[in-house]
Structure formats: structure tokens, C-alpha cells
């Protein structure tokens, strides 16, 4: 049994609508509908991973992990405290009553301090101090009491096929999948496997475990969503961290996502959660984590301290941090807010993502103290992303504007709808040249709004390698020459024209010339956001397409456009339910995309080339038929 898990089942409460009787567990009412309840007599209560010398304590009062081991809450209104202990030893599970508690195994009462081996199918009753008096309530049985369980042995090990000798060596003619000898072959095969299949491959043998674990570390994120008050209320949820540590003991992913509930010092489950996190984030696990997404509700100083404690444990290795807090601090007991400014040394932090929801006006003092602290803590990052709308982030931007030269090492800036000039004011104060700028939507703003955006692009034109924005205004937007730009993504709303101009020249005015304006462009994405009664075809928006696929200059004279550096062309239309990406042109008057972008190869461009080849062959055949015979 060693290496396998045990399962505790509790009786399921059922009601028979035919005879109107209540049933617990395997009991039956005896009517004809009884067979409909097959398999529903028991429900899973807890899984006990087998870990040598591991102790599981059952009860209602959690005190500490050192004294109680893994604590499992038993729902009972009477007799609070520890009820029983289950220990793992010698490949078996052993149960012992806690103190003077009454514990029955198969209706036999255990002696005090007597350790009893558990076997598959044993029935456990944790009754507290005394057995219930059957004479007072004769219909009550053990099965109907909280603390009644069925012990089952888990079957988690992969069984060998019948007749297979476990000591049998591989035949010499068989392929030897051993990392190190054919490392590239096995790695290449595993790279195509879905995530779940990779986890299964780890169970085949130790060699496959090593190779699959190496790939899983790069692909996986440990997601612990403990925010719901029900998640940590029941044993299955409260043992999440222990089960993960057991099942993934050889796998240490570098990315961790924690979503935490509010902390209440008088709640035993909150105390256990804090201890569990402190145990889980020990040094041997912390040193692998480089990316953290930390979320949850923060209503008090205790909540905030718990989050800061996690950050302190991980600060030595964190390179990428996202804060997804619901920040509603209302702790008036600490007027100086000293508890909000605990020192953190995020020396390796390069990426910071702001996803914080701030509180109401009455919480402004405490919340602004936190935001001001984090504005200072992330000044050395190279990439910052703001996922919330700026309307909710103005407090954070106000803190950032206090710096004369904010973000001296910043290279990439990503933000959701750019609705306020405060963001442009901040960006114009940046001194380090940007390599990436993503603005998900340029909304119509007052005064010099677009002029400031043009000034920003001009300031970083020589270093920008990625530029993303959604155009939402009829006013002309002048883009500068972008000599290093490799990726350009432009979106447009259906109600507005795409009025984008480039630096003028004597030969084509301000029409796009890829060789001069975008000499290194490798990826171009054009997105349409229809509204009202949308037309899901670029054929109805040729004027917008003409900006980046020009066939005529401003005077209406034909010009030849060609971009040999482009490798990826993506034309998308958003339907409200998803994207339509397969937008290719069929009418003969369409622009010659294949000759404009000769190095773009994808499915729809391949079909377009085939259609053009067929049309050319058909035209040649028709012309040959019209030649008179000599």
C-alpha cells in the first residue's frame, strides 16, 4: 500500500420521493426506486496522501501544524477540539483516539492511546466524549452523525499489464527512450503532448518523469484559488497545498498564482491557511518561483500583512509580479499606516502588472499609502502593464507623476483603454527609450490628446520594436518613420475612418512606403471592431485597408507597393463572440496582396496564390484558343 493514497468517504444524505424516507449512506428504504441511488451512498470527504510519518488530526480547533500535522476539520456542533489522529507508518494507516475521545472502528471502541491499523472498508465513527443514547433517539445511527467515515485504499499507482515481469530488462532491439542518449528525440516528442498527457507521461518511469517535468516547469502555472469562503471550509479544499506538495514533489514550476480570502484571526480555518502558506513557501520551493500573481480581498491590516509575508518569502527570486488585489483598506486602528510600508527588496523584479481595484473615498488615506508605496517599489522595472481602466487607476498615476524621472529602466508599457491625458503626461516624462508600446484603445479626448500621442511616438520612434493601438477618432493621426519597428498592430472602430498619415515625400505624398517608413516590419495585424449591423468582410472597408495596402497615391495615380520584410499578415474582424481571421479577397479588383507581400505565407494567402495561378492559367488558355491557325 506504500505510495498510494487513502480516501475517507462520508455518508450521503438522500431522500426517496416515492416513500418519502430519509436515508444515510448505504441504508435503503426498500422501495422500487432504491436502485436509482446506486453509487450515491457515499461521497468523498478527504484524501489522505501517504507520506511516511505524516500525522492527520481530525477535529474543530486548529492550533498549529507542528503539533497537529495536517488538520482536517470535522463538522460538529458539540465536543470541539481534537477527536482522533491518523498516522502513516510502515506503509499503513493507523488511527488513535485523541485524549478521552470515543472512536469506533467497525463498531468496536478503541482504547485510549491505542493505535489501530486501518484496512480497506473500515467504518470509523468519531463520536466525541460519549456515545449517543439510543433510547432517547432510537432512529439515530452512527451513519447519520458527523464524524462517520468509510476508509478506502486509493489506487493511484499504474498497474503493470498482466504477465509483465517487473524485473524484465528492455530488449536490445527496442528503442531506448533514455534522456541523455536520445535527449532531442524524447524532448521533441514530449513538446507536442498536451498538458494533461505530459502529467500522465511522468508516471511511466523515472526517466520520463525527469524529461516531462523539465517541460512542465516551463509551461505550467501553479494556480491556488482559495478566495471563495467555501474553498478552505471543507477538507478537500483545505488540503490542497499538502496534496500538491505530495503529488508534484519532483516538479517545481516557476509561476505561481495565489488568490486569497480575507483573514480573520479568530477563525481556525484562517489560521490554518496562514500556516499552510508558510509551510508551502519554504525556501526549497521559493527558490524556483520567478513569477507571482497575487490576488484577493484586502479589507484590513491583517489581510495586507499576510500578502506582504508571502512577498517577503519570494522577493529574492521574483522577476515578474502581478497584483490583483481588491483594495478596500478601512483599518482605522493604525493611524500612521506604518504597517503598510514594510520594506521589500525586489531587486530582481523586471515586470510589474497592476490589476488592483481600489476602494471608495472614505478609504482614500490607507489605500493611497499602499499605492504610493508600490509606486516607489517598482521604479526599477523594465516592463509595466496596467490591466484596469485608467478611470480606476488615476490614484496610482498621481503617485507616479510625483517622480521627476519615473521608471528610469522602462522598456515596455502596456495599458488598457487610454482615456485620460494623465497617462500621456506620465509617458512623456519617461527618459529611457521604449521598445514596446501597447495602447488597447485611443479614445476621443479633449484638446491636445492626439497631439501628445503623436509627440510620444516621435520621441521613441528610433527604438520602438512593437506598437499596438486601436484607432477611435476621425482626426488624422501622423505616424513617424519607425526604423526598428518589427510588429505593428492597428485596430479600428467601424464608425470611424482609418485616417493615418506617414511622413511625406515628393513621390507619394504621405502614403505609406514600407521601405522608407517601416523598413524592418515583420508582422502586421489589422483588426476591425464592427458595431450596429456589422459587415464581417473587409470588402466593405476598403478605405481602411488602403492605408496599409496602398495602390494609389493621394492624387489618385497608381503606385506599386512592396514589402519583402513582412512575414506575418493578420486581417481580423471581431464579431462580438470571437475573431474571424480567415479574411481573404476573392473579387478581381482586390489589391495584389501576394505581390505586395511575397514572403507572407499562411493558409489564406496560399489559397489566394492558388486562385491567382488558376485564373492566370485560364486566361492563357482562353487567349491561345483565340489565336487563328496559320
Image (tube, rainbow, N blue to C red):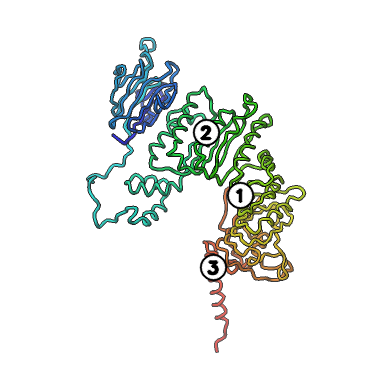
Is residue 352 positioned above or below 98 on the image? below
Q: Earlier in the sequence, mark 3 or mark 2?
A: 2
Query: Which mark is in front, 3 or 1?
Result: 1
Q: Earlier in the sequence, mark 3 or mark 1?
A: 1
Q: Which residue is mark 3?
A: 609
Q: Are marks 3 and 2 in contact (CB under 8 Å)?
A: no
- Please, what secondary structure does the residue beneath circle 2 have? helix
Name, please, the residue furthest toward the bottom: 630
Q: Position of residue 450 (x, y in %)?
A: 73, 52
Q: Disc 3 to disc 1, how far (Cα)?
A: 46 Å
Q: Quadrant of residue 465?
A: bottom right
- Please, what secondary structure does the residue beneath circle 1 have? loop
Horizontally, residue 226 falls left or right of residue 125, namely right
Q: Which residue is mark 2?
A: 309
Question: What's the residue at 39%, 52% (across, down)?
Answer: 190
Is residue 318 positioned above or below 607 on the image? above
Q: The N terminus lies in which quarter of the figure?
A: top left
Q: Position of residue 629 (x, y in %)?
A: 55, 87
Q: Position of residue 137 (x, y in %)?
A: 39, 12
Q: Which residue is mark 1?
A: 409
Q: Disc 2 to disc 1, how far (Cα)?
A: 27 Å
Q: Residues within 10 Å of mark 3 (few under 14, many from 20)?
A: some
- Please, what secondary structure does the residue beneath circle 3 have? helix
Q: Are marks 2 and 1 in contact (CB under 8 Å)?
A: no
Q: The C terminus lies in which quarter of the figure?
A: bottom right
Amino acid at each position: 500500500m506504500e505510495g498510494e493514497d487513502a480516501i475517507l468517504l462520508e455518508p450521503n444524505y438522500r431522500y426517496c420521493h416515492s416513500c418519502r424516507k430519509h436515508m444515510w449512506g448505504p441504508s435503503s428504504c426498500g422501495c422500487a426506486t432504491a436502485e436509482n441511488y446506486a453509487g450515491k451512498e457515499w461521497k468523498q470527504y478527504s484524501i489522505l496522501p501517504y507520506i511516511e510519518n505524516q500525522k492527520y488530526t481530525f477535529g474543530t480547533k486548529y492550533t498549529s501544524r507542528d503539533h497537529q500535522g495536517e488538520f482536517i476539520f470535522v463538522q460538529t456542533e458539540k465536543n470541539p477540539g481534537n477527536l482522533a489522529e491518523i498516522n502513516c507508518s510502515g506503509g499503513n494507516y493507523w488511527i488513535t483516539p485523541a485524549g478521552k475521545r470515543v472512536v469506533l472502528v467497525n463498531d468496536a471502541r478503541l482504547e485510549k492511546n491505542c493505535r489501530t491499523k486501518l484496512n480497506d472498508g473500515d467504518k470509523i465513527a468519531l463520536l466525541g466524549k460519549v456515545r449517543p443514547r439510543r433510547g432517547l433517539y432510537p432512529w439515530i445511527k452512527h451513519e447519520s452523525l458527523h464524524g462517520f467515515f468509510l476508509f478506502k485504499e486509493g489506487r493511484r499507482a499504474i498497474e503493470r499489464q498482466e504477465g509483465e515481469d517487473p524485473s524484465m530488462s528492455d530488449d536490445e532491439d527496442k528503442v531506448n527512450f533514455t534522456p541523455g542518449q536520445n535527449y532531442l528525440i524524447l524532448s521533441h516528442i514530449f513538446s507536442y503532448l498536451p498538458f494533461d498527457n505530459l502529467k500522465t507521461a511522468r508516471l511511466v518511469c523515472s526517466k520520463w518523469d525527469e524529461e516531462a517535468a523539465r517541460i512542465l516547469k516551463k509551461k505550467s502555472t501553479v494556480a491556488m484559488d482559495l478566495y471563495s469562503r467555501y474553498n478552505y471550509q471543507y477538507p478537500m479544499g483545505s488540503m490542497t497545498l499538502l496534496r500538491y506538495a505530495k503529488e508534484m514533489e519532483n516538479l517545481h514550476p516557476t509561476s505561481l498564482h495565489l488568490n486569497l480570502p480575507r483573514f480573520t484571526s479568530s477563525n481556525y480555518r484562517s489560521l490554518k491557511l496562514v500556516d499552510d502558506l508558510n509551510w508551502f513557501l519554504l525556501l526549497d520551493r521559493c527558490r524556483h518561483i520567478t513569477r507571482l500573481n497575487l490576488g484577493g480581498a484586502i479589507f484590513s491590516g491583517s489581510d495586507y500583512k499576510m500578502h506582504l509575508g508571502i512577498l517577503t518569502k519570494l522577493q529574492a527570486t521574483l522577476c515578474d509580479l502581478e497584483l490583483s488585489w481588491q483594495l478596500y483598506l478601512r483599518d482605522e486602528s493604525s493611524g500612521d499606516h506604518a504597517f503598510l510600508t514594510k520594506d521589500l527588496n525586489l531587486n530582481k523584479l523586471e515586470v510589474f502588472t497592476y490589476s488592483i481595484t481600489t476602494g471608495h473615498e472614505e478609504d482614500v488615506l490607507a489605500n493611497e499609502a499602499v499605492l504610493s508605496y508600490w509606486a516607489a517599489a517598482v521604479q526599477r522595472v523594465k516592463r509595466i502593464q496596467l490591466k484596469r481602466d485608467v478611470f480606476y487607476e488615476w490614484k496610482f498615476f498621481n503617485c507616479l507623476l510625483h517622480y521627476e524621472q519615473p521608471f528610469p529602466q522602462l522598456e515596455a508599457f502596456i495599458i488598457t483603454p487610454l482615456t485620460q491625458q494623465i497617462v500621456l503626461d506620465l509617458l512623456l516624462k519617461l527618459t529611457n527609450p521604449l521598445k514596446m508600446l501597447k495602447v488597447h484603445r485611443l479614445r476621443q479626448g479633449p484638446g491636445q490628446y492626439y497631439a501628445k500621442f503623436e509627440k510620444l511616438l516621435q520621441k521613441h520612434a528610433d527604438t520602438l520594436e512593437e506598437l499596438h493601438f486601436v484607432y477611435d477618432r476621425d482626426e488624422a493621426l501622423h505616424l513617424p518613420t519607425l526604423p526598428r519597428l518589427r510588429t505593428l498592430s492597428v485596430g479600428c472602430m467601424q464608425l470611424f475612418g482609418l485616417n493615418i498619415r506617414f511622413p511625406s515625400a515628393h513621390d507619394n505624398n504621405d502614403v505609406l512606403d514600407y521601405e522608407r517608413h517601416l523598413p524592418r516590419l515583420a508582422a502586421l495585424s489589422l483588426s476591425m471592431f464592427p458595431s450596429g449591423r456589422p459587415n464581417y468582410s473587409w470588402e466593405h472597408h476598403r478605405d481602411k485597408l488602403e492605408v496599409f495596402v496602398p495602390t494609389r497615391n493621394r492624387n489618385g495615380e497608381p503606385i506599386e507597393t512592396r514589402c519583402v520584410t513582412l512575414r506575418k499578415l493578420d486581417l481580423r474582424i471581431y464579431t462580438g463572440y470571437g475573431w474571424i481571421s480567415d479574411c481573404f479577397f476573392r473579387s478581381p479588383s482586390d489589391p495584389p496582396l501576394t505581390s505586395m507581400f511575397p514572403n507572407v505565407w499562411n493558409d489564406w494567402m496560399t489559397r489566394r496564390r492558388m486562385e491567382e495561378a488558376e485564373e492566370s492559367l485560364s486566361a492563357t488558355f482562353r487567349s491561345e484558343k483565340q489565336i487563328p491557325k496559320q
